[in-house]
Amino acid sequence: MNGNLQSPLLALPGDILLVLSLPCYLRDIEDFTNLCTTCRLLHGLSTQTSPKTILRLAAAASRIFFRPDPHFLVAATARQLGEWASLSSANTAQLRATFRNGAEGLMELALEHAGLTMDRIRELYGLRFSTINPIVDLIDKCVGEQWYATPNFWDGGVDDAWTIDVDPPETFFHLVIYGELFAPAFDLFLETGTVPEVANVNTRLEYVKYCIPDWACIACMGGACDVKRPDGSIDPRRAVEPVGPYVPFLSEEWIQNRTYPDKFTKHTHQLGLRHLQDSTRWNPSWAEVRAAVGGDFEEQWKQDLWWAIVTCQGLDGMTMIRPGNLAPWRERLTAWRARIEAMSERPNKIAVGRQGTYIFPDLKGDLDITTSGYTYGT
């Protein structure tokens, strides 16, 4: 503004301008950032805008700026959802029920109970180039199109040839969201040997079944070994309902002819993510991290716990396998390893049919349960 002239808009109180009302009339996060660059007053007031409002504006542009949609923003807010759910059993039950609506359901819940700041959005933008894109590329080389493009793929070109269909960006975020939701449980487990309800086996299996959709999860449950109860029903921990992402399995083409539903994802998300865990291209980077803070364990159960803690730390945890990024994690990793080394009792495993998963967040075990029946004898 020149001289003593002032726009009537700028004469409004700050809480009206950007803290309370004005953002509600904006279309998306792009409008918000453009508005905040118009003058110093609005730029200064932007720091006071509610994180919930900023998340709403970001979600409105998620298909443009936060792809894959809605996984990117779910990953950015999942830890907050886990913290909210841990406040009460009722909240945990609501989170567990929300899982049945898939990633879209989690995004809706995040809009109610989570938020983002502009500083965090800038951090996420930086992570997109420094961490997300390079690791998505690594996943593609492990289980994606680059992996399949290996010369002589089926004749020894790779040591783990298999038939899977993976979307590397979504696979990255499936792993990240699992970590964001359940990684906080590791500290309690190392202290007490227990896990909170929000990260127990039942809760985790609901996340994996419905938020990492895979035809093998629903189509093969009837063939899973030892999951049927005396009344003929399937153990609810293995059972999958045709809700959320599995609604296409209510179609006549599936019910009558067992024909793959046209509207269901073609990706084998769970099978692909489980295959990634054992990839000889994926694991060396994580082995380097573990070696830098004391190395691996000979006892299998300790190694299983150590592997899970290191690899399931969420979005920021992925930075540790990028060159030069271990320093911020070294102290925590060293402390976790020391506590594992001091443990003397093997953690319990929960059996579902012939498969089992540890009571602590155990993505490998969880996926073994949710895909049981796909491979004969499981």
Image (spheres, grey):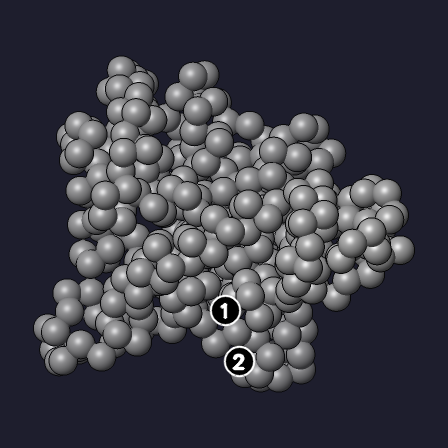
Q: Earlier in the sequence, mark 2 or mark 1?
A: 1
Residue 215 numbered tag: 1
Quarter occupied by the C terminus = bottom left
Determine crowd level at label 2: few under 14, some 14-19, many 20+ residues with C-alpha closer than 10 A. Answer: some
SS class of the residue under badge 2?
loop
Residue 40 in picture, x, y percent from top left: 67, 49
Q: Residue at x 55, y 40 (%)?
A: 79
Look at 30% across and 53% down and name the residue there.
277
Q: Given the current orientation, which residue lies at the most extreme front position?
A: 3
Where residue 87 appears, x then y in whole percent?
A: 67, 28
Of residues 82 and 36, the one drawn nearer to the viewer in this rendering: 36
The x and y percentages for residue 135 are 32, 58
The answer to whether residue 138 of the structure is visible from this angle is: yes
Q: Is residue 117 left or right of residue 176?
A: right
Left or right placement of residue 43 versus residue 178 in this view: right
**Foreground of the two, 119 or 56:** 119
Label ID, residue 323: none
Tell me which corner region of the image, top left, top right, bottom left or bottom right, holds residue 32.
bottom right
**How many badges with numbers are in the image?**
2
* Tag shown at residue 260: 2
In the image, residue 352 sits, relative to residue 58, either above or below, namely: above
